[in-house]
């Protein structure tokens, strides 16, 4: 199936942890900052950045050059098991992280059939793997073509704390630069791109109320105002006004918040999400809501709970029923805006039980008219759960 849009989004959406830990680069990869398992021990507190560059040579194997301190041997995995909650989304994440930590072995390598030689724009090419120093959970494309990614406060597990392992990959120079954060645990915080190209990140695990902004021009993180409530796995949307809207998350609460530059966060007490979202029992109602800015200036909530909603961020805020209902459970699926005001929803779970298989269902949601419209599409060729959708430069969705 092919769908078209007019502009390419910069954000690479938050990678689901289950898919990440099953497909990430070797956990036995030598870490850039191996003097401590706590990234704050290795950070220049004035800049919150360490300057280590790894140009790729010798068939993709990194050779280190440095500007501040010598690399040390690879740290061994922490022998202490991760303390996992007993139920819910949080329990699943920690269980998967612990399983990956205990295995601590390279991913499998399967034989592949090499395509015949031909034009690069026809047959494509696989580049050598990037020897990433930690398992990461979120990534974003920067305006200058680099990719920034971050994980948790440990290279191979996610266990709260107040720090974050991060790095920037420059594909043009084939260099990897360590860029840790010392006072904000950004594990499954939400990245949003501001209109000036800075990256806005709110929420996370151990420091759930915090907000950070990354300026690609200076390679610096800065601390912004704290939210009124902590939010882990929230949803966030950049607004044309330069503000940022955020909602839900854990613990989150019923009221969204809006961030205004140089003013901080304000609760939208007129937009309670208790009845339209949080009251759905049997669903993961407070994790990663699907939120998109519509052409009418309002925010559209398409799931993963059944009822779809309009959210108005003006004044104290307001919520109204969009008149559309999900006829499958799109949790762990993907929703992308492939054109202005047009969404593609694909995959997820067949139902809201914990053992539900993936689904091949897909739908279009059109927000360009006076009322929102949903059109069910022919099914995908394969059922997909924990899938991700990427809008390509030609407008297609992969």
Image (cartoon, rainbow, N blue to C red):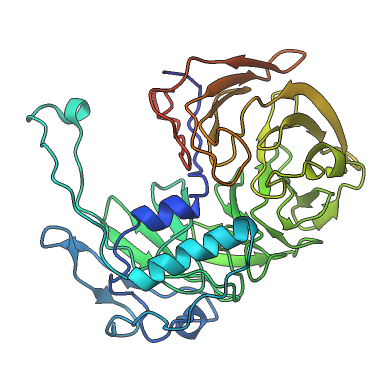
Number of residue marks: 0
Q: In this view, does 143 lie to the left or right of 257?
A: left
Residue 130 found in image quarter: bottom left
Q: Where is residue 165 in the image (x, y as percent from the top left)?
A: 47, 70
In the displayed structure, 374 sits above or below 177; it is above
Residue at (82% x, 34% y) in the render: 312
The answer to whether residue 56 is seen in the rendering is: yes
Q: Where is residue 357 in the image (x, y as percent from the top left)?
A: 49, 38
Q: Where is residue 123 in the image (x, y as percent from the top left)?
A: 17, 29
Query: Which quadrant holds the C terminus?
Result: top left
* Front position in the image: 253 or 184: 253
Q: In this view, does 206 lie to the left or right of 133?
A: right
Query: Which quadrant holds the N terminus?
Result: top left
The answer to whether residue 189 is seen in the rendering is: no
Residue 245 found in image quarter: top right
In the displayed structure, 159 sits above or below 293; it is below
Q: Is residue 62 left or right of residue 393?
A: left
User: In this view, which residue lies farthest toward the left?
Assistant: 117
Residue at (75% x, 30% y) in the render: 307
Q: Where is residue 67 in the image (x, y as percent from the top left)?
A: 32, 78
Residue at (55% x, 73% y) in the render: 159
Residue 391 found in image quarter: top left
């Amino acid at each position: 199936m092919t769908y078209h849009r007019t502009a390419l989004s910069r954000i690479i959406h938050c990678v689901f942890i289950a898919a990440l830990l099953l497909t990430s680069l070797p956990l036995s990869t030598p870490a850039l900052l191996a003097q401590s398992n706590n990234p704050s021990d290795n950070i220049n507190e004035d800049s919150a950045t360490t300057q280590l560059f790894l140009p790729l040579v010798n068939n993709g194997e990194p050779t280190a050059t440095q500007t501040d301190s010598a690399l040390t041997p690879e740290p061994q995995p922490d022998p202490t098991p991760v303390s996992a909650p007993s139920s819910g989304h949080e329990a699943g994440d920690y269980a998967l992280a612990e399983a990956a930590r205990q295995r601590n072995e390279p991913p499998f390598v399967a034989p592949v059939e090499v395509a015949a030689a031909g034009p690069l724009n026809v047959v494509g090419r696989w580049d050598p793997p990037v020897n990433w120093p930690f398992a990461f959970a979120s990534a974003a494309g920067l305006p200058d073509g680099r990719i920034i990614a971050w994980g948790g406060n440990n290279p191979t597990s996610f266990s709260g704390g107040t720090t974050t392992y991060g790095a920037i990959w420059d594909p043009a120079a084939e260099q990897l630069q360590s860029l840790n954060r010392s006072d904000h645990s950004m594990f499954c915080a939400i990245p949003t791109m501001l209109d000036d190209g800075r990256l806005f990140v709110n929420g996370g695990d151990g420091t759930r109320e915090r907000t950070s902004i990354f300026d690609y021009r200076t390679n610096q993180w800065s601390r912004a105002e704290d939210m009124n409530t902590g939010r882990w796995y929230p949803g966030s949307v950049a607004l044309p006004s330069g503000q940022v809207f955020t909602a839900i998350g854990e613990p989150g609460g019923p009221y969204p918040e809006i961030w205004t530059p140089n003013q901080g966060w304000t609760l939208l007490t007129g937009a309670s999400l208790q009845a339209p979202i949080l009251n759905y029992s049997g669903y993961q109602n407070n994790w990663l809501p699907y939120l998109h800015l519509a052409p009418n200036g309002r925010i559209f909530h398409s799931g993963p709970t059944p009822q779809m909603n309009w959210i108005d961020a003006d004044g104290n805020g307001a919520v109204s029923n969009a008149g559309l209902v999900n006829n499958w459970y799109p949790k762990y699926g993907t929703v992308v805006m492939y054109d202005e005001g047009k969404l593609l929803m694909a995959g997820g779970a067949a139902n809201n039980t914990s053992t539900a298989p993936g689904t091949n269902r897909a739908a279009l949601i059109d927000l360009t008219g006076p009322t929102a419209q949903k059109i069910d599409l022919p099914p995908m060729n394969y059922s997909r759960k924990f899938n991700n959708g990427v809008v390509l430069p030609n407008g297609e969705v992969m």
